[in-house]
Amino acid sequence: MAKYRRFVAYVYEYQKGKKGRNCGFIRVEAWEKRCRLEVHLHCPGLIPGVRCSVFGFVRNAGLMDGSLIGVCRTEENKADCVMETERENMGEAKISLDQMGGMILTTENGAFFGTEWDDQPVRPENFRRMKPAGEENESAGERKTAGMAENPEDRQDNEKTEEKEETGQEEGDEPEEERDDLRGETEEQTEEDARNQAEENPDQAEEDAGSRKNGTGETDDPGEEKKEKLTAQSVPEAVQETKTQDPEFGEEFDPFGDGEIMDCRKIRPEDFRYFCPRDCALRNNRFLQYGFYSFGHLLFGKLKTGAYILGVPGAYDQQERFMANMFGFPYFKQSGRISVPGNKGGYWYRLVNAPKPG
């Protein structure tokens, strides 16, 4: 049986061939013969209804050969979609997940987004769409010679011609036309830079920064991940106001059994109507939404100090930790009630204000 694989790759915008800001992520989950891709793109300026093509790419003699996996439509300032495919036959060129070095997203009005997980830079000028499986592609040598010398505008025209032949209509899946001295920046944004691009929890940034390691990629044991005591002195003043009667929404639940987090309840996004107004925006937090989508519930509970917490079910690994911190959930507590193949399951959580009375 194929090994279970699950990771998150962060997407960056490329303008005139240069790497820009972090603007979303792609979550990849593969098991047995299946692969699920969840795309979350947030880019101010995206207009709704624009065709967005999603490619997986393989490295080929310095070029990036892309296999079209699917197409979605943008919404205002964002694009979200979920795609499922065969793990060994992804996209129209039938590449495997193990071959892929990353993914590319292009829109018909010229936007170009990319991510990689093979530690090699994304260079938009080297991206080419592969022909469907069964149709002969150019040899690597021919592409290297011809592709690097041709004008990017000519390449875009050629791609549109291929689109017309295959679909009968024009699709612009290539990046912007003007590409002078395209080199592409290879510097990776630090975790702090990426976190600053998160659309949720700007007030959490200082707390998140303190919860991180030095970015070396080392994964700590979850039992040691957040062992600092959440004393009354470490809890924000607003959060300490917990004299409100305990909430009665949700379903009673005991995922831990050690008394550290008490009065736990399984909740759903609609239960946010009972939350303090300052916390209601967390309903739109993408990390929270994915956790609810994957496990069917969220967690509400209370620490021994009296402070309330909001938890998101998930797995403990380095990438998940980065993701949780980025979206404002810096603490992790393992639970036997959350089963994740090959990983330790539990809840990523954060402090919230006391719920509304009644």
Image (cartoon, rainbow, N blue to C red):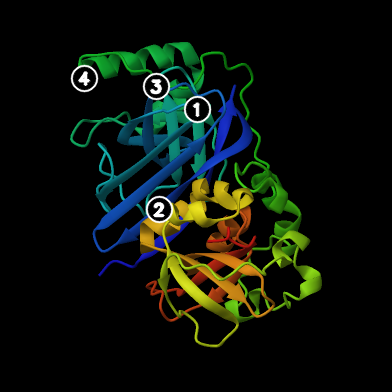
> Which type of secondary structure does the marked residue at label 4 adopt?
helix
Amino acid at pointer 1? Phe
Residue type at the position of mark 3: Val
User: Dividing the picture into quarters, in which one does residue 237 lie?
Assistant: bottom right
- Mark 1 touches mark 2? (CB < 8 Å): no
Label 4 belongs to which residue?
Answer: 167
From mark 1 to mark 4, how far is it between C-alphas? 22 Å
Q: Which residue, given by chain and number where applicable, does mark 2 sit on?
A: 28
Residue 145 seen in the current view: yes
Q: Position of residue 50 (x, y in %)?
A: 39, 21
Q: Counting residues from the N terminus, which is met first, the one under dot 3 or under dot 1?
A: 3
Pointer 4 or 2: first along the chain: 2
Q: Is residue 120 left or right of residue 292?
A: right
What is the crowding at mark 1: few (fewer than 14 residues within 10 Å), some, or many (at least 20)?
many
Residue 229 badge: none
Question: Tag 3, which secondary structure?
Answer: loop
Q: Nearer the viewer, mark 3 or mark 1?
A: 3
User: SS class of the residue under badge 1?
Assistant: strand
Q: Which residue is mark 3?
A: 50
**Sequence-first disc among 1 and 2:** 2
